Image (spheres, grey):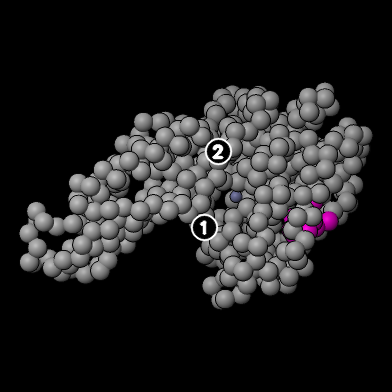
Amino acid sequence: MGLDPKRTIRELKELRALTATEDGAQRVAWTDVWLKSRDWFASKLLGLPVEHHLDAAGNRWVTMAGESEKALILGSHLDSVPNGGWLDGSLGVLAALEVMRRIAIDFKGRPPVTIRLVDFADEEGARFGRSLLGSSAFAGTHSVEADRVRTDKDGIRMDQALRRCGVDMDRFPEAAQEQKNAAAYLELHIEQGPVLENLMLPLGVVLGTKGVERHSIVFYGQEAHSGATPMKTRRDALAAAAKLALEIRTIAGRHPDAVCTIGSLKTFPGIVTAVVGRAETTLDQRDLSAAVLAQMYREAREASERFAKEEKCTVEWSRIWNIEPIQFHRDLVELCRQAVMETAGVAHQLPSGPLHDAAEVSRAGIPTVMMFVQSIGGISHNKVEDSSEEHLEMAVRAFDRLASKTMRWIESGSV
Ligand SMILES: [Zn+2]
């Protein structure tokens, strides 16, 4: 028997039954439920012609040696956010397992190229606020010192929590050894947004992950009595912040896939009888083009200075975090387009707004592409997260096609 997409759905439900409560998935990395999900996954490997181990960052690697040492890597993550969905991450891992089983049968355990499956540790960063932890260690982009002192909501330090799971943060850099012979990385994931559903398409080809500019912006005015201060003489910090909140919609609106979000606004003193003397906001900007991202940042900054001046205020910016846009490998995007086309008849290409482990793998210089399956209602990181079983089965079939095409691409010496 070859590929069995229905088995993937059965296994996803099995994992859900094992690790979800009525509030959703609870596979938060470095917790007992997560360890249980990983033990369950390891039990699925019995009988397959594979070797498996955990690397220095806790990523699980499953390897089926091939005629060539060049390796095709398939992967995603089993960890979830608290009260998460049943598909985010786990779909990619279990679809990869199904493809690996099919390849083991087709090639009697000895495929032409080496096939590896990876379950990255702590993609979500739900407990310590550090996303893409395992994949960044693999990519060699991780800075251990900045993270080891992070604490969870109970005050437990990250390095302590990891040690309890057998992972020593001092050894994180050794995870980069797993890059050896890596020729390509493929990841299947739910879209987590509404684009494919709005187009009534089951599957999508992911062009890359958007770059992110994340800033804290503080407007300074003058606290003043709300009764005694005439409108004309006010230095209202909220007025300037409010103008910016509207302006970023225009700034993003000039580019088809760009997004800008002011997700937080705090006013001080924040009482009903005072003009706002200080308004603290955050801005998150994303696009697949570095040039567009830089332009949107510049425009938002200029606008904030203009609005501050209009309101007789001042403004200060400080960067919270940023990451450059990641464009996936052109050849693999084309192979993904073919696989989606052959399976679904239409191949829509779209960027990913959320970051994924694939972004880190791509940063390591390994040719990478992702495939998306439609999310019902565009909802994720929520127990209602769902995709239709018909679409999930199509996704496993299309991903299997992509794996076959990529194996031939690797064999042909394109890398
Ligand atoms: Zn995910």
Report the Cα–Cα distance between label 1 and label 2.
Answer: 29 Å
Give whichever of discs 1 and 2 has the lower sequence position.
Answer: 2
Left or right: 273 as drawn, with respect to 18: left
* Rendered residue at 62%/63% (across/down): 147
Q: Is mark 2 within 8 Å of ligand 1?
A: no
Disc 1 + disc 2, Cβ < 8 Å: no
Is residue 221 depicted above or below 331 in this figure? Answer: below
Would you say residue 247 is visible in this rendering?
A: yes
Q: Which residues are magenta?
A: 53-61
Secondary structure beneath dot 2 equals: loop
Determine which of the numbered discs, if any, sits on residue 383 in the image.
1
Bin the neighbour count of mark 1 within 10 Å (Cα to Cα): few under 14, some 14-19, many 20 and up.
Answer: many
Is residue 261 depicted above or below 346 in this figure? Answer: below
Q: Which residue is mark 2?
A: 325
* Rendered residue at 51%/34% (across/down): 290
What amino acid is labelled 1 in the image? Lys
What percent of the width, then of the height, locates residue 361?
69, 43
Left or right: 267 as drawn, with respect to 197: left
Bin the neighbour count of mark 2 within 10 Å (Cα to Cα): few under 14, some 14-19, many 20 and up.
Answer: many
Is residue 309 depicted above or below 414 in this figure? Answer: below
Image quadrant in which you'd find residue 108: top right
* Rendered residue at 65%/66% (across/down): 148
Secondary structure beneath dot 1 equals: loop
* Rendered residue at 68%/72% (across/down): 160
What percent of the width, then of the height, locates residue 103?
83, 37
Q: Is-magenta flag for residue 157?
A: no
The residue nearer to you, when weighing 70 against 23, is 70
The residue nearer to you, when weighing 84 against 413, is 413
What percent of the width, then of the height, locates residue 112?
88, 32
